[in-house]
């Protein structure tokens, strides 16, 4: 009898645990499906934390008052549709969508300790010089004193250490700085304001969702080819950037989006760098055994076999990464934009050469980087294929329309 009672208690506990797990799964599923509820459950605390810091004068910036005021113009707070690693939440202001992000934490301490053990922070003029030097070293961009003052003074109260620390975190965040420094080039979402280490950028309408096996069953060849050409045009723009080209060490098709005025931008600049900075990072002399030890995400390095050290600059480029990861994809379950499309042999050959360029089509000193001429040939071939698909689609529509008319006449 005691054994039977224990069995009943155990079964009861198992059912309770099972019901609790199912309820939890249900709540989280609903949260991710309902983006407004998701914000209340998962992201609202970020907004609360920001406003508390603002009230205590630890955070400053134009975004603080806009988001924390009782008369805020923001509404429709939601979780992001994608890129939840970068975007905390989205909101609307006057009908336009904005994405609120948080700068990454960095260990580069801004203070030093004096003989009494007290933390000493730089004065605002010294902070100007620190920011100026950081921008020169990391981005090869020189700003004059007036531009530095405009970048710093408008957001920080005189010698407020806490506000200075939170803005130093912003200036060390690559995503934020790329948006600020290359704002006029319109390649990344524009930075619209900040509050301490939080900042808002314009929202993007993602062009292509995360690729899946369903792509093989859909008939969106035109859309995918147009998107491939748009991304190539975007990469051509990165090659022409001043003072030097920008390199993307992560390129995902579902991170490209359109602004309200239909300009293509990349959602996150977290893994985008100026060429000279990336080359220094990849050829920094660290010990290696394989080329993979010298690579940074999709940006490939080269291990010196004799020295067993990373001493070479980046070996591939944006076009190689585009061909391998965007056009071809990563197999059946992560297809590329060209997966499932019947390609002419000439185009198949060009894509293969783009992924593994032969010597005559390599950029000097970069063995895995296809030349600009090869990229232009690939662009033109893709454009011809798109035109052929559009023409065939128009013919199919015309044949279908004629068949419909014949059926109607036969019925009459």
Image (tube, rainbow, N blue to C red):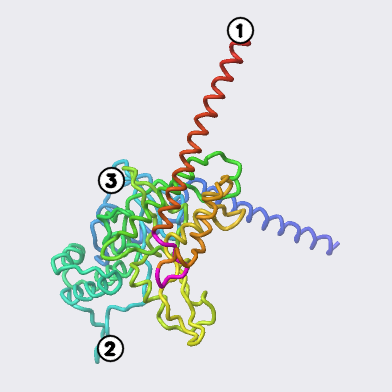
Q: Position of residue 373 (x, y in %)?
A: 40, 57
How far separated are the C-alphas under marks 1 and 2? 98 Å
The residue drawn where x is 25% and y is 72% is 136
Magenta span includes 371:
yes
Q: Which residue is mark 2?
A: 117
Residue located beneath label 1 in the image = 412
Q: Position of residue 117 (x, y in %)?
A: 28, 88
User: Residue lying furthest left in this view?
Assistant: 146
Q: Give the image location of residue 192, x and y in percent.
A: 27, 54
Q: Give the magenta part as a residue range.
A: 364-372
At 28% from the left and 45% from the top, the residue drawn is: 73
Q: Is residue 114 magenta?
A: no
Label located before the other in sequence (2 or 3): 3
Q: How many marks?
A: 3
Residue at numbered disc 3: 73
For label 2, the SS is loop
The C terminus lies in quadrant: top right
In what element is the residue under mark 3? loop
- Number of other residues with Cα within 10 Å of mark 2, as a class: few under 14, some 14 to 19, many 20 or more: few
Q: Are marks 2 and 3 in contact (CB under 8 Å)?
A: no
Vertical side of 365 occupied by 24: above or below: above
On the question of residue 51 being in view, the answer is no
Given residues 174 and 387, the one toward you in this image is 387
Residue 269, quarter of picture? bottom left
Helix, strand or loop under label 1:
loop
Q: Looking at the image, is mark 1 or mark 2 earlier in the sequence?
A: 2
Q: Residues within 10 Å of mark 1 (few under 14, many from 20)?
A: few
Considering depth in this image, is 309 or 97 the residue closer to the camera? 309
């Amino acid at each position: 009898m005691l054994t039977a009672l224990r069995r009943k208690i155990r079964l009861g506990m198992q059912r309770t645990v099972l019901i609790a797990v199912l309820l939890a799964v249900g709540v989280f599923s609903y949260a991710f499906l309902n983006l407004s509820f998701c914000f209340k459950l998962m992201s609202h605390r970020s907004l609360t934390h920001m406003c508390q810091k603002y009230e205590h004068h630890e955070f400053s910036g134009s975004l603080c008052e806009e988001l924390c005021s009782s008369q805020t113009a923001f509404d429709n707070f939601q979780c992001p549709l994608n890129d939840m690693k970068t975007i905390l939440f989205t909101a609307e202001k006057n009908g336009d969508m904005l994405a609120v992000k948080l700068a990454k934490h960095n260990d580069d301490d801004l203070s030093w300790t004096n003989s009494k053990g007290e933390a000493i922070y730089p004065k605002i003029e010294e902070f100007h010089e620190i920011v100026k030097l950081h921008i020169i070293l990391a981005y090869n961009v020189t700003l004059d004193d007036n531009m530095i003052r405009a970048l710093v003074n408008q957001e920080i109260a005189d010698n407020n250490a806490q506000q200075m620390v939170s803005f130093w975190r912003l200036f060390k965040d690559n995503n934020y700085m790329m948006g600020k420094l290359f704002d006029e080039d319109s390649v990344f979402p524009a930075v619209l304001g900040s509050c301490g280490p939080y900042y808002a950028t314009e929202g993007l309408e993602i062009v292509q969702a995360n690729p899946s096996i369903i792509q093989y069953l859909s008939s969106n060849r035109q859309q995918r080819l147009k998107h491939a050409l748009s991304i190539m045009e975007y990469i051509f723009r990165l090659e022409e950037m001043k003072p030097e080209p920008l390199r993307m060490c992560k390129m995902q098709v579902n991170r490209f989006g359109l602004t309200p005025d239909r300009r293509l931008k990349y959602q996150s600049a977290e893994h985008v760098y100026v060429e000279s900075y990336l080359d220094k990072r990849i050829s920094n002399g660290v010990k290696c055994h394989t080329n993979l030890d010298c690579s940074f995400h999709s940006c490939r390095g080269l291990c010196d076999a004799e020295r067993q050290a990373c001493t070479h600059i980046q070996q591939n480029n944006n076009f190689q990464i585009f061909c391998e990861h965007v056009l071809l994809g990563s197999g059946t379950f992560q297809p590329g934009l060209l997966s499932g499309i019947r390609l002419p042999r000439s185009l198949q050959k060009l894509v293969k050469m783009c992924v593994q360029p032969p010597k005559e089509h390599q950029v000097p000193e970069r063995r895995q980087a296809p030349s600009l001429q090869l990229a232009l040939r690939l662009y033109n071939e893709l454009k011809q294929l798109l035109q052929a698909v559009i023409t065939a689609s128009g013919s199919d529509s015309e044949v279908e329309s004629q068949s419909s008319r014949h059926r109607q006449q036969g019925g009459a």
